[in-house]
Amino acid sequence: MSEFKQRRDALLALMDNNSVTILSTNSLQTRSNDTEYPFRPDSDFYYLTGFKEDNATLCLVKKENSVKSYLFLQKKDETLELWTGKRLGVEEAKRCFEYDDIFISDERFEKIAFELENCDKVYCDIFNDNKLFIEIQTYVKKVLHQRTIKRSPREFSDILALTQKMRLIKSNNEITLIKKALDITKEAHHGAMKAMKPKLKEYEVQAMYEYIFKKEGAYSDAYTTIVASGNNANTLHYIENSDFLESGDLVLIDAGCEYEMYASDITRTYPASGKFTEPQKELYTMVLEVQVEVIRAIKPGITKTSLHILSEKLLCEGMVCLGILKGNVETLLEEKKHKKYYPHGIGHWMGIDVHDPCPYYDENGEELLFQEGMVLTIEPGVYLPQDDENVPLKYRGIGIRIEDDILVTKEGFENLSQGIVKSVEAIEEIMSYSSIFER
């Protein structure tokens, strides 16, 4: 039995009796005029199906004493396939996937409408106002008034509340795919570090990452690569990537690839010239020590909030020691003075989406405790704008973030990205090597 079928069976077990789940994947999205963006399936749909073609629909039916699963996909079309590539088609899909039946998408509404009759509840993506959801709502309104139908759906429920909770705990296979994505990301970070030098454009560095991602078999980048040199690093999601790397600047690079639909998310901060200055080393070492200590605290039974509070305390202490903040640490924390230079959280869930939309709180509003199999990022940072006169002159214009991807294990944690160098000594050493990008 495939892992995808196991997930569908697990979802069926969570569904109420006499209910239907309907979940569609994306259609092609127009980029400009008659050209489209590269297609990527909806994450929750893929999690349950393993199917990567556009305009497909999953239907799960749970009755008192039976369950059924259907997949709807686009039909074979020789003319269309001439331009856009082969489609799997119904017959081949039946050989590749485990469903009770597979139909073409043209039959979707007819089949689903039949299953909606005499069911009580519909699970779907209720916050996505797509064509299928509107069709379902319209049909349900219609059958409510048909005397020949004994019962009809009276309740809509968000299916993503179930699937995204399921996605919190990664299987061994999922962890293997994340590790593979990180192996590729390691090659990209190390390759770019070796090629780093002043007067390169930020987008040239971005191109190095994307080249290695594709060369090593990654589907794509997991998000738009950030290459932020100098003061640009103080814009948290800087993606313009258009400035020159200047001698003496630090370069903050947030880059990860997507391998077989699973993401990596890594940030490192490097000296453009290959050597940290003393002020840069002081600030970088402080952030790194905070990150290491926060990671060490990870284990089952704690919360993400506790990690964030720890990171705030440690970063605030570090900034006081360096003269960036002045005063009593507890008072500074109470007054949130540290937030000016550390405005974001300590991390986020990661998996099929780089920011996995899994819940952080349960149905009662209680924060979820860490469990074995969860994967999250840990990414403390300090951002000191060039024009902030409250910051010692030697630190102005520096932004530093260090990010790793962490698996919660039975006894504690595993740093899945530990092979990507981050100590001052290791960074300077690897940046002294020759590069595949040498002209």
Image (cartoon, grey):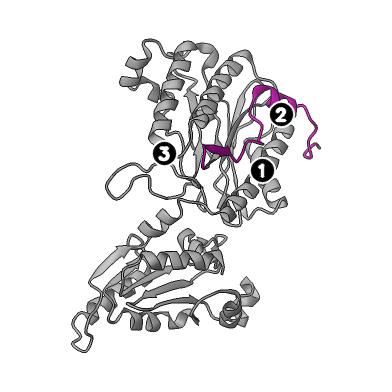
Q: State the residue in front, 319 or 317.
A: 317
The residue that label 3 is drawn on is: 301
Image quarter of the C terminus: top right
Q: State the SS at label 3.
A: loop
3 and 2 marks in contact (CB < 8 Å): no
Give the mark nearest the N terminus, 1 or 3: 1
* Image position of 265 with respect to 307: above or below: below
What span is colored magenta in the figure? Answer: 410-438
- 216 vs 323, left or right, is right
Q: State the SS at label 1.
A: helix
| Residue 1, x across and y down, in percent | 56, 69
| Residue 291, x across and y down, in percent | 52, 28
How far apart are the two marked residues, 2 and 1, measured between alpha carbons?
A: 15 Å
Q: Amino acid at mark 3?
A: Gly
The residue that label 1 is drawn on is: 209
Find residue 83 and report its image quarter.
Answer: bottom right
| Residue 426, x across and y down, in percent | 70, 26
